Image (cartoon, rainbow, N blue to C red):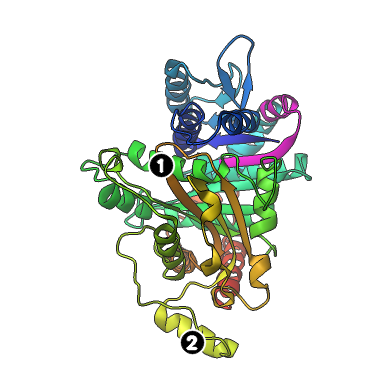
Amino acid sequence: MSIITIQLGQCGNQVGYEVFDAICKDLHSTRGLCSKKENDSYQAACKERFFSEEKPGVPIARAVLVDMEPKVIGQTISMASRSGSWKYGHHSHFCQKQGSGNNWANGFCLHGPKHKEAIMNLVQKEAEKCDRLSGFLTIMSMAGGTGSGLGAFVTASLRDAYPNSFLLNHVIWPYGTGEVIVQNYNSVLTLSHLYQSSDGLLVHENDAIHKICSQLMNIKQISFRDVNRVIAHQLGSVFQPAYSSKGATQYSRSPLGDLMEALVPHPEFKMLGLRNIPQISENSLAYSTFAWPALLKHLRQMLIANAKMEEGIDWQVRPPLPGLTLSEKQSLNKMAHFNTSIANLVTLRGKDVQSADLGGFQDPALYTSWLCAPDALAVWKSPRAFNKYEKSASLVSNSQFLLKPIDSIVGKAWKMFASKAYIHQYTKFGIEEEDFLDCFTALEQVIASYASL
């Protein structure tokens, strides 16, 4: 089944380009390390999922590009075309000549209603090209105006127009040091609205990816493109074809549906985090060897200690012992910073993948008490290697990983709101103070729910 990607705003379009480029490079990789039959099956499933094809011609990304300024969309379309291996459709983009000025209300209240028909027509044309539609993946930032405000509006419109399709929002979390003075307002408004419309929110934190670029990839002068490439690699490691159950003879037909079934058992819990291992510079790759026991041991500890990368993991954090009461468990978690999970999805790719032992992820102590460990863990596998890695493992987790970041953003936004800072910039577009209060209330409920695990 096919996934339609909606690239929203400057960040969404730049990340979206890197995602399709990473997928296409993997598609044509000569280091698949599997049989020709397996490789052919993998390539066919990948093409159906992410591309439509002209005959004759290069694959066309199943994507709709939206921005209120033309510059980034023009660059993105041009780079894809120059690659020679894939491209965007000729009429798959929408842009205007005036941006949203980093104002969520401008994107949501003004640009959204004004341009809804044109954007949704592009989405419909893309959907009509799909023999079987799995759903939509939106890629957007929380900090600015178009990606966040228009992105939230488009998400709600998708939910209304396609109520039976799966809808996953990929959200880029802003740098803690601040990119935009009102980014905390924009983030609070974005998250609370997405929570109403989306089936799941898959979050990447800019600060965490920046550290990966610096400490694991050894990049000296880190650019936004470096950050976006790491994000794209992690997304590709999950969304490329894989077998979703033991003995399966076909790649997963509904990747978004399988993801939601595995990870979002309750509408109160929709926040998903992604970790990928190993990630190292290409220069180091030729001299590195990896074994499944070591990879999975590190990935499990990254989950437990809420580490975003394998370097600097706190190995002192341990799951609570069996037999503890809920209050004792919560108290211990606060002291040890143990990251309790609702559900986890582990994706393994590469050589000897069937020999990998995932017993460590089946430990009931990792999970909340209201979901049995066998139901809380899903495993996807593929014998085909991903990109240049002989063996790789990814973990998508519905856990407490975002508790502190959400709490921090809500706290900062509330302080600004209490002093009425910049509120007039939102009210002039139709967002009232009551709307802010509703959003604060909604996110405080999310925080309370995850804190109670």
- The quadrant the N terminus occupies is top right
Q: Nearer the viewer, residue 394 or 135?
A: 394
Q: Is residue 404 left or right of residue 166?
A: left
Type of amino acid at the residue the image marks with label 1: Tyr
Q: Image height check: is 82 above or below 36?
A: above
The percent position of residue 260, horizontal first and vertical second, equals 67, 54
Question: Which residue is the extreme one toward the top?
Answer: 56
The percent position of residue 37, horizontal first and vertical second, equals 61, 30
Question: Which residue is the extreme one toward the left?
Answer: 220
Q: Is residue 154 left or right of residue 414?
A: right
Q: Is residue 139 magenta?
A: no
Q: Residue at x 65, y 49 (%)?
A: 244
From the image, tell me which residue sits under label 1.
Answer: 389
- The quadrant the C terminus occupies is bottom right
Q: Residue at x 50, y 33 (%)?
A: 23
Q: Nearer the viewer, residue 397 or 287?
A: 287
Residue 341 occupies quadrant = bottom right
Question: Which residue is the extreme one toward the right?
Answer: 164
The percent position of residue 152, horizontal first and vertical second, equals 60, 46
Q: Residues within 10 Å of mark 2 (few under 14, many from 20)?
A: few
Q: Is residue 399 visible?
A: no
From the image, tell me which residue sits under label 2.
Answer: 331
Q: Image height check: is 11 above or below 446?
A: above
Q: CA distance from mark 2 to mark 1?
A: 40 Å
Type of amino acid at the residue the image marks with label 2: Ser
Highlighted magenta segment, given as a residue range: 122-138
Q: Which mark is residue 86?
A: none
Q: How many marks?
A: 2
The percent position of residue 407, horizontal first and vertical second, equals 47, 68
Which circle, 2 or 1, is nearer the viewer?
A: 1
